[in-house]
Image (cartoon, rainbow, N blue to C red):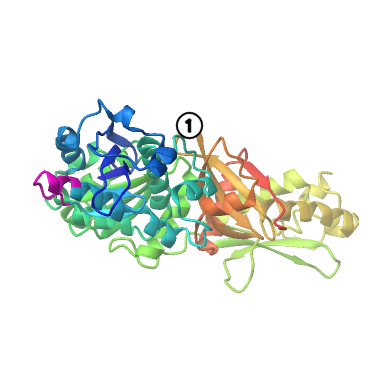
Amino acid sequence: MYAILDIETTGGKYNEEGITEIAVYQYDGHQITDQFVSLINPERDIQPFVVNLTGINSNMLRNAPKFYEVAKRIVEITEDCILVAHNAQFDYRILVTEFKRLGFDFIRETLCTVELSKHLIPNQTSYSLGKLVRSLGIPVTDRHRASGDAIATVKLFKMLMDKDSSKKIIQESIRKNPKLQLEPRHIDIIEQLPSATGVYYIHKADGDIIYIGKSNNIKKRINQHFTNTNHKSKKIQIQAVAVTYETTGSELVALLKESEEIKRNKPLYNRALRRTVFTHALYSFVDDHHYINFKIDKVDGRKKPITTFSNRDSAKSFIIHAIEEYQLCQKLTGIYKTKTSCFNYDIKTCHGACIGKEHYEDYNKRAEAFIKKNSYKNTNMVIVDKGRDIDERSAIYIENGVFKGIGFFNLNYQINNLELLQSIITPMENNRDTQHIIQSYLRRNKRLKIIQFNNER
């Protein structure tokens, strides 16, 4: 659990500042669970430059509560939470100082979104809250007021958690949260999980991840883990202390994140080197008569396939549909073994490429259209899919035929701005697994929105 906060102060000498406004949003990693926002009477003068910056003046604070009147509420809303702030060292120092004046030792773990941003979103021109969130397409209102800045920090922290592929933030959180050191009943874990699409992480007591999975219904899948009687499930059940999750909205994003994070985190009960999920591929070659031919074969790492499949049957089914859609020749696609004409020519549905009757240039145009449709080689595009909320969409970014990563964007922002797109993307590894996952998903979901773009700057 996190307490994301922002504090406005009077300004002045070090450790003599007073609080003029505070906003605290309790956040469970997915949504705000509690909040406290209040003006504070600092019982001292406000520096003129601070009045100009925040708009908060002494008249506004005359009837506001003094710090000791809200101190109990601040203790309660931050209890068992990690404090998160933009420049956390400042906000935490101010709180500790105020509590010391009351004779109370205020001790909390902290996380700084400035430091996290520098690590997870490098090469930004500025890491001030206002400039950073604007560059990332995060909406912000009431800038330099505690509530507006704290809400912007919540949204920034959510993006940083998305970008934290190694899951250091959440693992550290579990280590530091004393409530999670005692093993809870499995039913309590399940009750807190959503029936939503996403990736889940099963942790042991020290926070380490022992299993990563993907599901269209996280709650149902975890219930299966905790009720199955096979050997691996029983081992997981003994060690499982907590389950964290990331909703993705998009099944494609969940598949890509699962693949990437198993490789990155190497959980104990995921096979460290997962067996390749695709066994067969579709290749093309040009024969002696200049016709493009297709061949289904076992995956060969030395060759570049058009697309890949989980088994030969699914590959064969795919090429049969392509023959019909693109009027391809059964013989030249390897489906009909013959030294003469194919069966479709005999029933007048093939134009005769199999016997040289159709000119190779005419036939190859259709074959090339088929290749282009099913291979994103040298392609610059964004696949737009469902987001985690109704006003959000996910973006799967491919540049020059290379999968670059995934991100989420608010519908109020246009992602045809390449710089904005690149700033919200969490970089991910491009490999044969990701290519297979993306191409397989595109085959099954033909109505996905795809934005083509020119990568020239």
Left or right: residue 430 compared with residue 77: right
Crowding at dot 1, Cα within 10 Å, few <14 / some 14-19 / many 20+, comes out as few
> Along the horizontal axis of the image, is 369 left or right of 1?
right
Whether residue 106 is in magenta: the answer is yes
In this view, the residue in front, 90 or 277, is: 90
Give the residues drawn in magenta, as a range: 98-107
Q: Quadrant of the N terminus?
A: top left
Q: Is residue 20 left or right of residue 359?
A: left
Is residue 345 shown above or below 41? below
Main secondary-structure element of the magenta-colored stretch? loop
Q: Nearer the viewer, residue 223 or 287?
A: 223
User: Could you say where residue 296 lies in the image, as x and y percent from the top left?
Assistant: 64, 61
Residue at horizontal 88 percent and vertical 58 percent from the top: 361
Query: Toward the viewer: 148 or 350?
Result: 148
Residue 329 visible? The answer is no
Q: Amino acid at mark 1?
A: Ile
Residue at the spot of label 1: 390
Q: Quadrant of residue 210?
A: bottom left
Quadrant of the snapshot with the C terminus: bottom right
Q: Considering the numbered disc 1 on the image, is that residue within a helix, a strand or a loop? A: loop
> Residue 346: x and y, percent?
82, 48
